[in-house]
Structures are given as structure tokens and as C-alpha cells.
Image: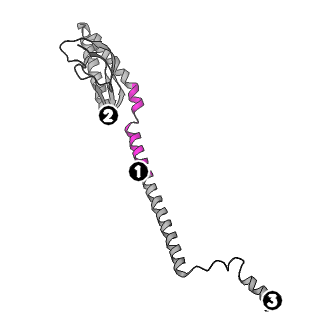
Amino acid sequence: MAPDEKLSEAQATPEGAADTPAPTLEEEVAALRAALAAESDRRLRSLAETENLKKRLLKEKEEFQKYATESLVAELVPVLDHLDLALAHGRGNDACKDFVVGVDMTRKAFLDILGRHGVAEFGRTGEPFNPETHEALGMASLPDLPADTVAQVVQKGYTLRGRLLRPAKVMVNKI
């Protein structure tokens, strides 16, 4: 062999290529199918992740809209407390009868408006004491009520669409 033939033969086959045989057609097809399957799986996972993100964002938006008025309502609840105080102090006085009727009507209208927006009032004498919704201020002893019930409501509680806005402040009956 001439030196030029040796040089052209060396240029034609790169170093180390003689050690690895060329892949067969079936091996190339199998490798391409595996790559296609991996890419298809990645695409499906990406689509599922996008759908989950859409659902989560929609749920967060609904939750935000549902409780967007919470801070406003929390600031309006003391107005109801003041109306309750006005009613409690005016009911014993006959001179304030018309005033009490007006305050009572105002309170009812105000509570109706809040009710249309998801606010519910709770806290009644005789209902079972629930530490999740009632704040016990003390104990009372009333023989006509069962134990562990609300003996006196000091301040009513409120919920906004089922979420506790303010616990009812109560006296608990202990016999």
C-alpha cells in the first residue's frame, strides 16, 4: 500500500470509529421510538400541569370573590353592636318608644342587607356551647338550662358564608 492510500484510509475512518459498530436500522428505529415516547409523555405532563394550574387559579378566584367583602363586613359588625346597645338601653324607657322602634327597624334593615351578602348572626341563649364559635367570658348558674349551654349572650357572633367572622361572647351555664 502506498503512503497516500494509508493517509486517505485514515482520513476516511475517524479514530475510534472502528471500535464501535454502526447502529443497525432496527436500533435507530427503536431509539427514535423511545425518544418519541419520552417527548409525548413530557407533552402530556405539560398539558396536565397547565390544566391543574387553570383549575387552581379558578378556585382561588372564586374564593377571593366569595370572601372579598370580609374586611368591610368585619368593620361594620360593631355598628350592629351599637344598635343592640341602643335597643337594650331604650327598651325600659317609655319616653324613647318611637326612638327604639326606629333603631330596631334600622338594625333589621342593616342585618337584612348583610344577610343578602352572606352574613349570618348567631349566639342565642340555650344553644349548646361550641368552643369553635363561642368565646366563653365566664360561667353562670341557671337551673332551668342544661349544663354546657349558653346562659347569656354578651355579644353576638357572625359568619360570612360559613366562615367565622367573629365568635359570640357568651356566659356558659354550669349547674
For label 2, count other residues whose C-alpha is less than 10 Å away and answer few (under 14), some (14-19) or many (20+): few
- Please name the residue shown 49% across and 62% down the image: 42
Dot 2: element = loop
Position in image of residue 155 (x %, y %): 32, 18
- Please name the residue shown 43% across and 57% down the image: 48
Quarter of the image where the C terminus is located? top left
- Please name the residue shown 30% across and 34% down the image: 116
Residue farthest to the left? Answer: 144
For label 1, count other residues whose C-alpha is less than 10 Å away and answer few (under 14), some (14-19) or many (20+): few
Q: Name the residue under label 2.
A: 162
Q: Do the residues under discs 2 and 1 have CB atoms within 8 angstroms?
A: no
- Which of 83 and 161 lies nearest the eye of the viewer? 161
Which quadrant holds residue 12? bottom right
Which quadrant holds residue 1? bottom right
Which quadrant holds residue 154? top left
Q: Do the residues under discs 1 and 3 have CB atoms within 8 angstroms?
A: no
Position in image of residue 151 (x %, y %): 25, 16
Dot 3: element = helix
Please tell me whether residue 168 belongs to the stretch shown in magenta.
no
Position in image of residue 161 (x %, y %): 32, 35
For label 3, count other residues whose C-alpha is less than 10 Å away and answer few (under 14), some (14-19) or many (20+): few
- Which of 81 and 21 lies nearest the eye of the viewer? 21
The vertical placement of 104 against 13, above or below, is above
- Which of 3 and 115 lies nearest the eye of the viewer? 3
Q: Give the range drawn in magenta.
A: 53-75
Q: Mark 1 points at which residue?
A: 55
Q: Name the residue under label 3.
A: 4
Among numbered discs 2 and 1, the one appearing first in the sequence: 1
Helix, strand or loop: magenta stretch: helix
